[in-house]
Image (tube, rainbow, N blue to C red):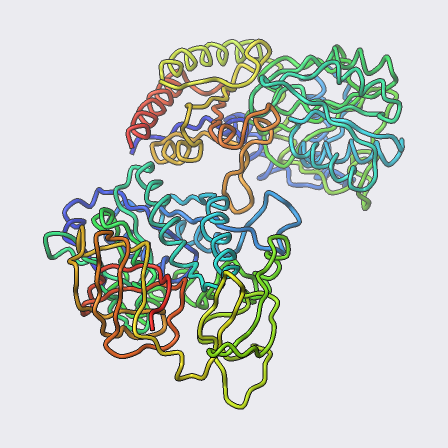
């Protein structure tokens, strides 16, 4: 069943803005809130124009927006498309390309949540007379304690809290995740039960704004004007194995496409943006003892304790590993020491801190520490 | 729930009751094909011809000069494209024409046709010196300037344009869509060569429009496949729309004076009320303008935020133009007036019609004041 935070049950007259992508998850989230009697308003964010629609400069119309509109209409909800192309280009697409350019591996979904959904859309919901913003994320906001806490969604395979570490702590009371207690299968079942047009819709691709999913090509095209950072491919001992056209083509832990031959499989161990050097080594050399996270955001505390133990998740598709986290005078920076060495810590990805299913906070991986 | 207030007549208007009745009657009883020779067809034919006469009468033109089309967008396309095709000369338009003019001219420009654009000042007024230069330009054969602007409500001195243009053997086309039912239109007195019209902005039916062409000039079909409208516009006549159109035009002819007067009073009242809102500014030429349109901005307030909040508050206004997916783009008209992107996005348009009541306007102003107050406190 849906998460029904007590706070919201009290006053069903409250308006809730629902971010609707046109996918099955946000459709069901909207439908459940409407069913529960909330005064729901649907908003789709128009974030980019897909290339095949370039024929008219003012026109966009990804079918997703029409799907969202149809669902909203079926539910009797007012529905609007908000034009956030400019912000999305700056805060997500430019960021995405820039990170690759300097040899880091960006996470655009986190950037979109931080700067679009839980920033300007949250503000927009106030403008629409709604304190609350709901999305179809698989995550739970637990209202049982003194202050709301972000927890993992019930469906472990779909849990999306990794992408949500940047939620402003003060916004937690205003955010609703209706799907947190459901599995994906249950969401589809609900969608079918309610005859939603989006019930059988396929999962969205990973990077929404890269048509066809070839992000390397996308980045390379964007960098044609800005220029790339070429350099050498070297072993840890400095032995030069070859040259490359730009560090944007590499990511930590990458094995394929290095364009070098060697008697054992080699992996990208680190990338030095200053001179374009890509350091490679055998799989065993990828393990590091820790990392530095910057631009941290804390959810469980106004200010974290100086030292604490927790689980740290360093990429979406991996389990948290045990670690000791030290936060100094500047709470936006955290030093993480793993209990056991961890492979392929990737600058540009998020490090998210968990205690059980509670999300303590997170930050952006700045560098690994051996 | 309180009833909503609809003040977006420049987008489209609610059907006038008499128009709806005429259309329903036609849909039920006069469904024949106007080009058929049997009695069912004859009945339909007379509906179309009466509609043509009603249009002609409403704008002071001879009936044979009126060609019925599928709407003003089609009329604009046909007039400009047909001119270029047959005369082989260039075309010019103002920067604040409807997209069905500006984009046609852009298309032609891309295809290698000689074109020019008349710029406007910060109030949306034409640069008359440029008008003169363009008319003197021998490569330009047609100038297109609307009679009244849909977004800011400016009314242009088309007679003056005609005087200058005709001195240089340049033809003049005017899109009078937003003027119909709001201010008097006299095709003969204006002296224009070509006019486009549609009827749904003042309470008539959608899906029908007109080309009006002066005696001695012709417009040819840009589509093939039928002899309707004397070969100018193939396709089965839209008889129910024609039935509604006739009534709409007759109502214009009978009531325009009263309508204009009532709208003018409502506009003044709205301005008095709205100007009390902090940061309120009105855009466009306040000297020569329609009686039904107010384009305004609340300084520093995003128009999209305001529009959405107003909509949820029960008031329908508009801004810029919505793309296919429904997201807003800043108005090309306000941009052409020299406003920066952010300032252009502040523009909101309020437009109403003769059946809009004083109470509706008062309530709209209250909703705007309350909403602006709430938004400015966030």
What number of labels is visible?
A: 0
**How far across and down, in percent of the image, does residue B371 sit?**
33, 28
**How far across and down, in percent of the image, does residue B306 sit?**
40, 31
Name the residue nearer the viewer: A136 or B37. A136
Q: Is residue A191 left or right of residue B194?
A: left
Residue at point 33% right, 49% down?
Answer: A118
**How far across and down, in percent of the image, does residue A360 sit?**
21, 61
A140 to A319, vertically: above or below = above
Name the residue nearer the viewer: A357 or A351. A351
Residue at point 35% right, 64% down?
Answer: A191
The answer to whether one can see residue B327 in this image is: yes
Residue at point 82% right, 45% down?
Answer: B224
Q: Is residue B117 left or right of residue A267?
A: right
Q: Quadrant of the N terminus of chain A?
A: bottom left
Q: Is residue A194 left or right of residue B259?
A: left
Q: Is residue A353 left or right of residue A98?
A: left
Q: Quadrant of the C terminus of chain A?
A: bottom left
Q: Based on the displayed image, in which of its 4 quarters is residue B75 positioned?
A: top right
**How far across and down, in percent of the image, does residue A263 sit?**
54, 90
Name the residue nearer the viewer: B64 or B145. B145
B33 to B102, vertically: above or below = below
A261 to A133, vertically: above or below = below
The answer to whether one can see residue B251 in this image is: no
Q: Based on the displayed image, in which of its 4 quarters is residue A361 positioned?
A: bottom left
């Amino acid at each position: 069943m849906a998460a029904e935070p007590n706070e919201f049950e009290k006053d069903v007259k409250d308006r809730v803005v629902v971010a609707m992508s046109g996918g099955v998850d946000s459709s069901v989230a909207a439908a459940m809130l409407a069913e529960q009697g909330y005064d729901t308003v649907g908003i789709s964010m128009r974030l980019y124009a897909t290339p095949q629609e370039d024929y008219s400069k003012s026109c966009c119309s990804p079918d997703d927006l029409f799907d969202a509109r149809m669902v909203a209409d079926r539910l009797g909800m007012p529905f609007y498309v908000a034009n956030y192309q400019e912000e999305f280009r700056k805060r997500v697409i430019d960021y995405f390309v820039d990170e690759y350019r300097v040899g880091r591996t960006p996470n655009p979904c986190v950037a979109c949540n931080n700067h679009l959904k839980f920033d300007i859309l949250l503000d927009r919901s106030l403008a629409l007379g709604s304190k609350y913003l709901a999305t179809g994320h698989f995550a739970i906001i637990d209202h049982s304690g003194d202050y709301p806490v972000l927890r993992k969604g019930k469906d472990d395979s779909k849990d999306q809290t990794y992408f949500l570490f940047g939620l402003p702590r003060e916004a937690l009371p205003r955010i609703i995740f209706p799907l947190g207690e459901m599995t994906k299968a249950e969401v589809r079942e609900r969608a079918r039960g309610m005859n939603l047009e989006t019930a059988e819709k396929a999962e969205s691709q990973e990077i929404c704004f890269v048509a066809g999913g070839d992000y390397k090509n996308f980045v390379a095209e964007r960098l044609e004007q800005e220029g790339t950072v070429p350099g050498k491919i070297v072993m840890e001992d400095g032995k030069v194995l070859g040259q490359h056209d730009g560090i944007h083509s590499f990511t930590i832990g990458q094995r394929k496409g290095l364009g070098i031959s060697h008697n054992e499989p080699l992996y990208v161990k680190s990338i030095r943006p200053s001179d374009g050097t890509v350091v490679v080594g055998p799989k065993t050399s990828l393990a590091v003892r820790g990392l530095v996270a910057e631009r941290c955001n804390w959810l469980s505390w106004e200010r974290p304790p100086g030292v604490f133990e927790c689980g740290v998740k360093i990429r979406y598709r991996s389990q948290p590993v045990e670690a000791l986290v030290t936060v100094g005078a500047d709470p936006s920076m955290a030093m993480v020491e793993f209990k056991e060495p961890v492979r392929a810590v990737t600058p540009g990805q998020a490090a998210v801190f968990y205690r059980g299913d509670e999300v303590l906070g997170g930050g952006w991986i700045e560098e690994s520490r051996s | 729930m309180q009833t909503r207030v609809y003040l977006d007549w420049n987008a489209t208007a609610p059907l006038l009751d008499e128009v709806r009745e005429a259309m329903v009657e036609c849909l039920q009883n006069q469904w024949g094909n106007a080009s058929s020779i049997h009695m069912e067809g004859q009945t339909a034919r007379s509906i179309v011809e009466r509609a043509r006469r009603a249009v002609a009468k409403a704008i002071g033109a001879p009936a044979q000069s009126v060609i019925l089309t599928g709407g003003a967008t089609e009329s604009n396309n046909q007039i400009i494209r047909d001119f270029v095709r047959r005369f082989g000369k260039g075309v010019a338009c103002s920067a604040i024409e409807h997209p069905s003019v500006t984009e046609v001219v852009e298309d032609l420009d891309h295809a290698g046709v000689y074109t020019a654009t008349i710029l406007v000042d910060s109030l949306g007024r034409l640069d008359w010196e440029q008008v003169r230069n363009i008319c003197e330009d021998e490569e330009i054969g047609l100038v297109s300037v609307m009679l009244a602007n849909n977004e800011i409500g400016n009314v242009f001195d088309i007679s003056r344009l005609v005087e200058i243009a005709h001195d240089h053997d340049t033809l003049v086309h005017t899109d009078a869509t937003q003027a119909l039912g709001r201010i008097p239109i006299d095709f003969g007195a204006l002296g224009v060569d070509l006019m486009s019209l549609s009827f749904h902005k003042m309470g008539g039916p959608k899906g029908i429009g007109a080309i009006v062409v002066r005696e001695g000039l012709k417009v040819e079909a840009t589509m093939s496949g039928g002899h309707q409208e004397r070969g100018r516009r193939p396709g089965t006549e839209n008889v129910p729309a024609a039935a509604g159109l006739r009534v709409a035009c007759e109502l214009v002819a009978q009531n325009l004076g009263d309508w204009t007067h009532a709208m003018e009073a409502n506009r003044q009242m709205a301005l008095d009320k709205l100007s009390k809102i902090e940061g309120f500014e009105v855009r466009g030429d306040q000297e020569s303008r329609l009686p039904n349109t107010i384009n305004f901005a609340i300084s520093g307030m995003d128009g999209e935020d305001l529009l959405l909040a107003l909509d949820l508050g029960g008031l329908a206004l508009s801004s810029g133009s919505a793309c296919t997916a429904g997201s807003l783009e800043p108005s090309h008209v306000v941009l052409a007036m020299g406003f920066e992107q952010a300032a252009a996005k502040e523009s909101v348009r309020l437009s109403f019609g003769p059946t809009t009541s004083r109470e509706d306007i008062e309530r709209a102003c209250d909703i705007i004041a309350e909403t602006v107050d709430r938004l400015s406190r966030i």
